[in-house]
Image (cartoon, grey):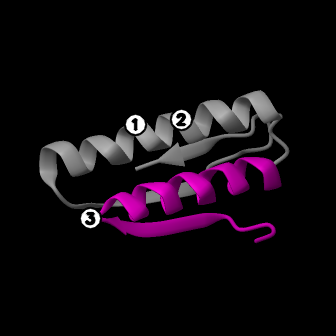
Amino acid sequence: MGLMSSFEHAIGRPSDVLEFRRVGRLLAKDMGFGLADQTRLATTIRHLASNVLKYAQQGHGRIEDASDDVQRRIRLV
């Protein structure tokens, strides 16, 4: 994938949850996060996206690099 800064995706089926999780992990890796943090982020994304399916049946998500000069940050919306 390589140095992406954001990703938007519809969430309406289980495969969307997996794709959203995969891309979030790749973003974290591209940004230099360690393996443990990549795994934590992927787990959080999976929980959030799964809850979209469970409670709303469909939705939309965005993952983005929200870093500044001081800290590396990933924003999930």
Disc 3 on helix, strand or loop?
A: loop
For disc 1, the marked residue is 47
In the rendered structure, does residue 22 fall within the stretch colored magenta?
yes
Q: Amino acid at mark 1?
A: His
In the drawing, does residue 64 fall left or right of residue 45? Answer: right
Left or right: 72 in relation to 41: right
Q: Tag 2, which secondary structure?
A: helix
Mark 2 closeness class: few <14, some 14–19, many ≥20 residues within 10 Å: some
- State the residue in front, 14 or 63: 14
Q: Secondary structure at mark 1?
A: helix
- Per the rendered image, the range of residues in magenta is 1-30
Q: Which mark is residue 43?
A: 2
Q: Residue at x 42, y 69 (%)?
A: 9
Query: Callout 3: few (<14), some (14-19), or many (20+) C-alpha neighbours within 10 Å?
Result: some
Identify whether 64 is placed above or below 8: above
Residue 35 locus on image (x, y percent) = 80, 35
Q: Verify CB contact (< 8 Å) between mark 1 and mark 2.
A: yes
Q: Residue at x 41, y 63 (%)?
A: 15
Can residue 7 be seen? yes
Residue that numbered label 3 is attached to = 12
Q: Are marks 2 and 3 in contact (CB under 8 Å)?
A: no
